[in-house]
């Protein structure tokens, strides 16, 4: 009986460590996915800000040209 308990504890310990590693890897993959999503959102927001800045500069130049023509 003692040998069975000893074998079960070793096997149980190995299974627990494997389960913990699997859970850690799943959490790590989820975190990397979240970081990738955040970076993509930041890139999209940067391009939107760039387009808005260019549109503002074009509008401002158009207004100045309109005032100079009058």
Image (tube, rainbow, N blue to C red):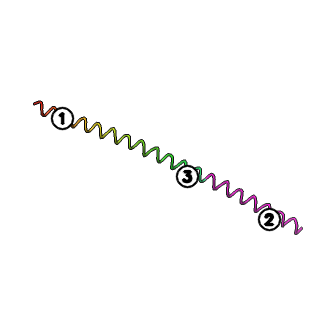
Left/right of residue 60 with respect to residue 6 in the rendered view = left
- Mark 1 lies on a secondary structure that is helix
Location of the N terminus (image quadrant)? bottom right
Left/right of residue 24 with respect to residue 48 in the rendered view = right
- Mark 2 lies on a secondary structure that is helix
Question: On the image, numbered disc 3 is attached to which residue?
Answer: 31
Between the residue at mark 2 and the residue at mark 1, the CA separation in whole angstroms equals: 80 Å
- Residue 63 shows which numbered tag? 1
Q: Residues within 10 Å of mark 2 (few under 14, many from 20)?
A: few
Give the main secondary structure, helix, strand or loop, of the magenta stretch: helix
Coordinates of residue 12 in the picture (x, y in percent): 78, 61
Report the span colored magenta: 1-26
Instruction: Answer above or below: position of 46 versus 68.
Output: below
Question: On the image, numbered disc 2 is attached to which residue?
Answer: 9
Residue sticking out furthest to the top: 69
2 or 1: tag closer to the N-terminus: 2
Instruction: Answer above or below: position of 31 versus 5.
Output: above
Between the residue at mark 1 and the residue at mark 3, the CA separation in whole angstroms equals: 48 Å
Residue sticking out furthest to the bottom: 2
Coordinates of residue 21 in the picture (x, y in percent): 67, 56
Label 2 or label 1, whichever lies nearer to me, is 1
Coordinates of residue 46 in the picture (x, y in percent): 38, 43
Q: Residues within 10 Å of mark 3 (few under 14, many from 20)?
A: few
- Mark 3 lies on a secondary structure that is helix
Q: Residue at x 87, y 69 (%)?
A: 2
Left/right of residue 43 with respect to residue 68 in the rendered view = right
């Amino acid at each position: 009986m003692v040998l069975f308990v000893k074998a079960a504890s070793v096997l149980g310990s190995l299974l627990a460590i494997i389960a913990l590693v699997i859970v850690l890897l799943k959490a790590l993959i989820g975190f990397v996915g979240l970081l990738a999503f955040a970076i993509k959102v930041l890139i999209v927001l940067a391009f939107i800000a760039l387009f808005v800045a260019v549109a503002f500069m074009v509008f401002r130049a158009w207004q100045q040209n309109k005032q100079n023509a009058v």
